Amino acid sequence: MSDSLFPVRQTRRDFMKLGMLAVGGLALDSVVSADEAKPVTIGTGAHTFTLDAAWGKLPKGMSYGLGCAIVVDSKDNVYVTSRSQSPCVAVFSPDGKLAETWSEDFAAKVGYTTKDVVGTAHGLYWSPEGKEEFLYFTENAPGKRVYKTDLKGKILYEIGAVKKEGSTSQAFKFDNPTDVAVSANGDIYIVDGYGSQLVHRFDKNFKLIKTMGGPGKEHGKFNTCHGIWVSTIGKVPEIWIADRANGRIEIFDLELTYKRTIEGFKAPCCFYQHGGMIYVPELSSRVSIVDASDKASHLGDGSGVKEKGPQHFIAPHALTLDSKGNLYVVEWVGDGRVRKFVPKPA
C-alpha cells in the first residue's frame, strides 16, 4: 500500500471504520460480478437511479485499474482514468460507445511510460474556458505535477516537479496534489491533499495569489484535503474542500477566507455540481447530494467495505453527471467498478 495515499498513519480498525480496505487494491471481483444480474435501483424519491449495467465495458485485452477520476465534456463524452496501462484513459461517446482509448500515446505526451502513468494517476478536472475546453490532471508521487491539456491529452501547461522551466512549464513545490478547480475568472485552485495539506490559489496564468491550510482539525486546516470545487449553487460562488479524514466539507469564499463547515461525511473525496446540487463521492460506500441549504441526501448506506450487491457502493472515489442527469461513478477498487446510473425519479 502506498503511504502517500494516507498522510496520517491509519490502523486496520481505522480503515474498516472509513471503508477504505479497497484502497489497498483488494480483489473485489466477487463483490461486483453480480452487476449485470438484474435491474438495480438506488436512492429514493427525486434522487432515484437505475444502473445501466451494459455501459462502460472495455474490449478483450483491456481492463480498468483502481478507479481514479471521471469527467464529462460539453458534448457528453465521458473520460475515465484509472490505474491501468491499457487503457490509461477511456473515452465514451454520448451513445455509450467506446470512442477512444489512450495508452502509450497519452503516456508519451505527458513524458511517461504507461507504467509510470499507473504509478501517478489520480485526479481529472474538466474546465470550460471561454469557447474552449481543457482537462487538468493531478498526479501523485513521484511526479507531483498538475498539467493542463486539450481534450486529446496534449499538455499545454505543467506546474510542479517539471524537468525544465519554460513558457509552458513552471517549477512549484507540491507534495502530492490531488485535485483542481477553476473559477469563472480563470483563477486556479489546487489542493495538496496527500501531502502538505495546503491549498493554493493561482491566477489564470499560474501566478501564485495565496496559499493557506496545513494539517489539523481546526477550521482552515485539513486532514487529507482531497477534493476542491467552485460551487455556484448558492447566491455567491464558494470554494468547497473535501476534508476527507476529518469527515467534513470546509467552505470558503473565493479569497479562501473560511465561511462554514458541513459535518457528517464519510471520507468525502471530491465534488460535481449538477441541477443546483453538489454530488459528493465518499470512500465509505456512499454518494451524498447536497442542496443550497447544506442539507444532504444519500445514495448507499455508508457502512464501509464489506460484501455487497450492485445496489450498493463500495468505495466511490470520483463521479460526474452528463447533461441528461446520468450519474457516472468510479470506485477505488481493483477493477475501478466504473458504472452509469440513469435518473428514474420516483
Image (cartoon, helix red, strand yellow):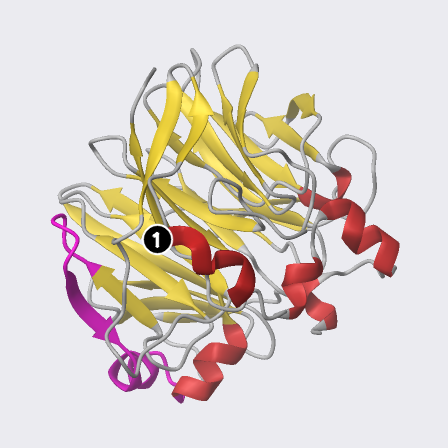
Q: Quadrant of residue 176?
A: bottom right
Left or right: 184 in relation to 282: left
Magenta stretch: give its range: 92-113
Quarter of the image with the N terminus is bottom right
Q: Point out residue 214 in the picture as x, y percentages from the top left corner.
A: 76, 48
Residue occupying image coordinates x 31% and y 50%: 53
* Amino acid found under the numbered disc labelled 1: Glu
Residue beneath label 1, please? 36
Left or right: 106 in relation to 234: left
Q: Quadrant of residue 155?
A: bottom left
Q: Point out residue 135 in the picture as x, y percentages from the top left corner.
A: 31, 57
Where 335 falls versus 294 (above or below)?
below
Q: Is residue 200 magenta?
A: no
Residue occupying image coordinates x 32% and y 18%: 345
Residue occupying image coordinates x 34% and y 60%: 80
Where 143 falls versus 184 (above or below)?
below
